[in-house]
Amino acid sequence: MTRDEFKDKILTILTEDFEFEQPGLDDNLRDDHGFDSIDAIELLGKIELLLGFSFTREEKEKAMEIRTISDILDYVEGIQHSRNS
């Protein structure tokens, strides 16, 4: 899946499942959209389903640093790259 395809899927999840209105790639998920840790865990599960694999504990801990949609894209791209190397 390309970065653009993944971005479209994430934006769809955020607007449909989390009721974001016009999310911007650099919006702060917490400050701009009221995203909390429960939301983050739920989104992480949805991302795992999209990718077809589960994250390691270390990868999940690193996910807690995510603040924007761009961060999500970078995070997933990094994991895919490390697993394909």
Image (spheres, grey):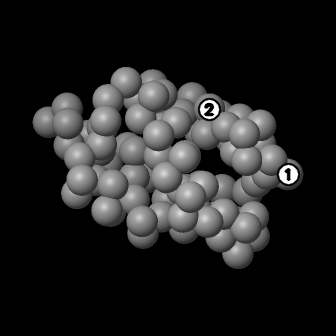
Disc 1 marks a residue whose amino acid type is Glu
Above or below, 77 against 26 in this view is above
- Position of residue 38 relative to residue 81, above or below, is below
Residue denoted by label 1: 21
- The label number, if any, that marks residue 47 in the structure image: none
Q: Which residue is pictured at 39% across the width and 59% down the height?
A: 63
Q: Residue 43: horizontal and vertical position, in percent?
A: 55, 46
Q: Using residue 5 as the reference point, say whether residue 25 is left or right of it.
A: right
x, y percentage for residue 44? 47, 46
Horizontal side of residue 37 vs 31, given as left or right: left
Q: Secondary structure at mark 2?
A: helix
Whether residue 54 sits left or right of residue 33 in the image: it is left
Q: In the current view of this chain or complex, which residue is farthest to the left?
A: 85
Quarter the C terminus occupies? top left
* Horizontal and vertical percent position of residue 51: 41, 29
Q: Name the amino acid type tagged 2.
A: Lys
Q: Earlier in the sequence, mark 1 or mark 2?
A: 2
Residue 4 in view, yes or no: no
Q: Quadrant of residue 48?
A: top left
Residue 67 falls in which quadrant of the image? bottom right
Residue depicted at x 38% and y 43%: 77
Towards the viewer: 74 or 63: 63
On the question of residue 78 being in view, the answer is yes
**Which residue is located at x 31 percent, y 62 percent?**
61
The reply to whether dot 1 and dot 2 touch (C-beta < 8 Å) is no
**Farthest residue, direction right:** 21
| Quadrant in the picture for the N terminus | top left
Neighbourhood count class around disc 1 (C-alpha, 10 Å): few under 14, some 14–19, many 20 upward:
few
Task: Pick the residue in front: 58 or 70.
Answer: 58
Image point (30%, 43%), residue name: 55
Residues under labels 1 and 2: Cα distance? 15 Å
Q: Which residue is mark 2?
A: 9
